[in-house]
Every structure is written in structure tokens, then in C-alpha cells.
Image: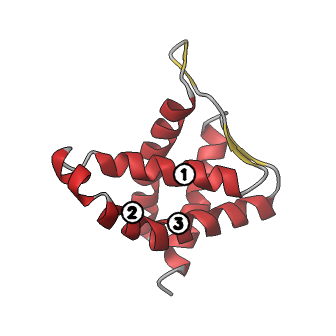
Amino acid sequence: MNLLKPFIATALTLVVLSYFLPNVSFMHWTTLIIAAIVITLLNKVVRPILKILFLPINIVTLGLFSVVIHVGLLWLATYLVPGFQINNLNLFGTELNQFASLLVVSIILGFIQGLFGLIL
């Protein structure tokens, strides 16, 4: 049950993101499910290990390096799941690079996941 709730929240969040943001896309529903599983597992298994490894940097940056860790995990999920893509985002007429696009999507993903986590 500890992995089912975050998995459902992640899957719903990816559906909402792909509907509202043109740069987040997946090929099929199976790709969505696999991406949700991969993101959930990365957040539950790899993220705590990376937070411990990068604790000194995180302390120096007052916790802002956690955002970089989350962006890296999101990039890793797009790399591991073929058919799940986050392309460059065009924000207010300015095309953002891959890192900035992942940063924006990561912030929105965390916010919506938090909302779905409260509802579920």
C-alpha cells in the first residue's frame, strides 16, 4: 500500500501534465504506467540514497540541491522509459533548454503530486 498511493498520484499527475503541457508526452497508456512505476521507484529508492550522498552540498545550498536531484531523477526516468518524453518548453516566447524544461516540469510535478497525495 505504501507504493500504490504514490504510484496512482504519479500516474494521475502525468496524465494532467500531458494534457496541459505540450512538451510532456507518452506513446501509449502502457508507457504512462511504466513511467509512473519508474518515477515512483526512483523517488522511493534512489532519491533517499542521493539525498544522503549529497547532504553536504544540500546543506550549503540550503536545500536547493534537492531540486537538482529531482530534475536528475526525472531525466533518468525519461531516459529509461522509451516513449516517455519531456521536450524543450516554450515559455512566454522563450524556448528553454532541456534542464530548464525539466526544472519547470519537476516543480509542477511535485506540486500536483502533493495535491493528489492529499486527496488520496
Residue type of the residue flagged with mark 3: Leu
Which residue lies at the image location 41% right of the left edge and 59% below the top edge?
115
Q: Nearer the viewer, mark 1 or mark 2?
A: 2
Give neighbour class at mark 3: few <14, some 14-19, many 20+ (Cα, 10 Å): some
Q: CA distance from mark 1 to mark 3?
A: 9 Å
Q: Secondary structure at mark 2?
A: helix
| Disc assigned to residue 9 | none
Give neighbour class at mark 1: few <14, some 14-19, many 20+ (Cα, 10 Å): many
Left or right of 78 in this view: 58: left
Residue 55 position, x and y percent, is 25, 59
Q: Nearer the viewer, mark 3 or mark 2?
A: 2
Q: CA distance from mark 1 to mark 2?
A: 14 Å
Q: In this picture, is 108 found above or below 13?
A: above
Q: Which residue is mark 2?
A: 50
**Furthest-right residue in view?**
28
Residue type of the residue flagged with mark 2: Leu
Q: Which residue is mark 1?
A: 74
Residue type of the residue flagged with mark 1: Leu
Q: Which residue is mark 3?
A: 42
Q: Secondary structure at mark 3?
A: helix
Q: In this picture, is 78 found above or below 49?
A: above
Which residue lies at the image location 25% right of the left edge and 50% below the top edge?
57
Left or right of 25 in this view: 50: left
Q: In this picture, is 117 found above or below 78?
A: below
Q: CA distance from mark 3 to mark 2?
A: 10 Å
